[in-house]
Amino acid sequence: MSNKAKRLPRRQFLKSALSVAGAAAVAPTIIPSSALGLDGAVAPSERVIVGGIGIGNRGTYDLGCFLEQKDVQFVAVCDIKEARRTAVKKIADEKYGTQKCEMYRDFRELLDRKDIDAVLIATGPNWHATAAMNAAKAGKDMYCEKPCTKNIAQSLILADTMRRTGRVFQAGTQRRNLPHFAFACELARTGKLGKLKKVYAHPAGMQAMTSGWLIPEQEPNKEVVDWNMYLGPAAWRPFNAKLLDGFNFEKGGGLVGGGVLEWGSHCVDLCQWAVGDCPPPIEYNAPANGELMARYENGVELIYREKGWIPLGSCPVRFEGETGWVEAGDSGKLVLSSPELLAGRSVAEIGGYPATYHVRDFLDCVKTRSQPKGNADAACNAHIACHAANIALYLNRQVKYDLKKHEFINDEQANRLRSEALREPWRL
């Protein structure tokens, strides 16, 4: 372009400049401090946009932990109960001073949203694995409550799905991010107790049952309670309001998880960590005197024990080596065979098993794309250990597990309990 073409007459230049300046004076650009990350706010580019699936009692607690984090923006809730959808929307809208939290009855509509980075999955255990795998395929990271799976087959598929999709998965085993449990596991894992011999987990009940039907009741309108969606992958059965509350581990005609799976997904997970996050045990024996003994490939024994614990609160674990032992529970306290095991270190006593630290670990990993403490592989191995123990408990005899084939050795009856039929369209 020539110099002549670039020039503007002085009068035209002044007229244009005054016009722009006048427009700016009339409509100045206002950028809120929250958009710039000022006044303690987090800039939009640093926020993790979160949706919730199945937010009941436990989920509401988890949601509170998420909302405490300044870099979280909670934008949507899905639940099969209208009352819960409305309650969670109210919590989110009051938090942000808006009316923008969207409600969904079908979780697939929530997963279709491109703006959502991660989801909190706190449905009943019947849905955990199926919802998590759908979320992964939709490109979402997830914090998933436990028990994460209903059987061994689901555990393996869940871990494989997270590896293939590259999603960040955090099982709700929040004790992995509490300092006294972490310290106890470190003592066992690093040889401070001598060669590790036994690890103990509290199952909170030695029982295994099969599921059944309750008396049929009038099914509500699906906008109020979507019964078909609630059953999801489980076998159909008539509506009964009692099935909507509490931990319904299995609604499909298979094996119920019982206390071995509920507390085990916490306590056994810690034992797995203490042993070194290795594959699950290879041998599970029939219960005797309130204990069920399993054995790892390296000879360490995993003992599911109901009684005999030092009173340190719920979810106790104990690790024994050749030269020392440590026991911990939800009180936040440790009891050790020798004070020398502390080696001058002070361990924070945080009682009440809060999930805040676990949620923070998850969010940090969403940003860095690293593996959180309760990742899918760790959850897979801990859950297999629980499911296999439950099968030995149900059959009331020893079962042996092949770690390469992921099946029980020469045991057709036990192998039938590794998985279950799923309703369409929820097959994995």
Image: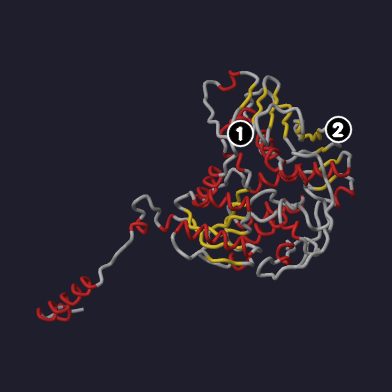
Q: Which mark is residue 181?
A: 1
The part of the image, by quadrant, that contains residue 27 is: bottom left
Estimate the x, y position of residue 358 in percent, counting from the top left: 56, 44
Q: Nearer the viewer, residue 415 or 108?
A: 108
Amino acid type assigned to the residue bearing label 2 in the image: Ala
Q: Residues within 10 Å of mark 2 (few under 14, many from 20)?
A: few
What residue sits 77% from the left and 67% below the top?
Answer: 218
Left or right, 333 with reference to 206: left
Q: Nearer the viewer, residue 220 or 170?
A: 220
What residue sits 45% from the left and 56% below the top?
Answer: 47
Estimate the x, y position of residue 233 in percent, counting from the top left: 75, 62
Left or right, 31 with reference to 177: left
Q: Nearer the viewer, residue 14 or 349?
A: 349
Asked if residue 20 is positioned above or below residue 133 in the image, the reply reads below
The part of the image, by quadrant, that contains residue 173 is: top right
Q: Tell me which colouring the rendered structure shows.
A: secondary structure
Looking at this rendering, what residue extends furthest in the left direction? 10
- For mark 2, what is the residue? 288
Decide which of tag 2 and tag 1 comes sooner along the chain.
1
Q: Residues within 10 Å of mark 1 (few under 14, many from 20)?
A: many
Helix, strand or loop at mark 1: helix
Left or right, 44 with reference to 80: left
Looking at this rendering, what residue extends furthest in the front direction? 218
Distance between mark 2 and mark 1 Cα atoms: 28 Å
Amino acid type assigned to the residue bearing label 1 in the image: Phe
Estimate the x, y position of residue 352 in percent, counting from the top left: 59, 38
Position of the N terminus, as image quadrant, is: bottom left
Helix, strand or loop at mark 2: loop
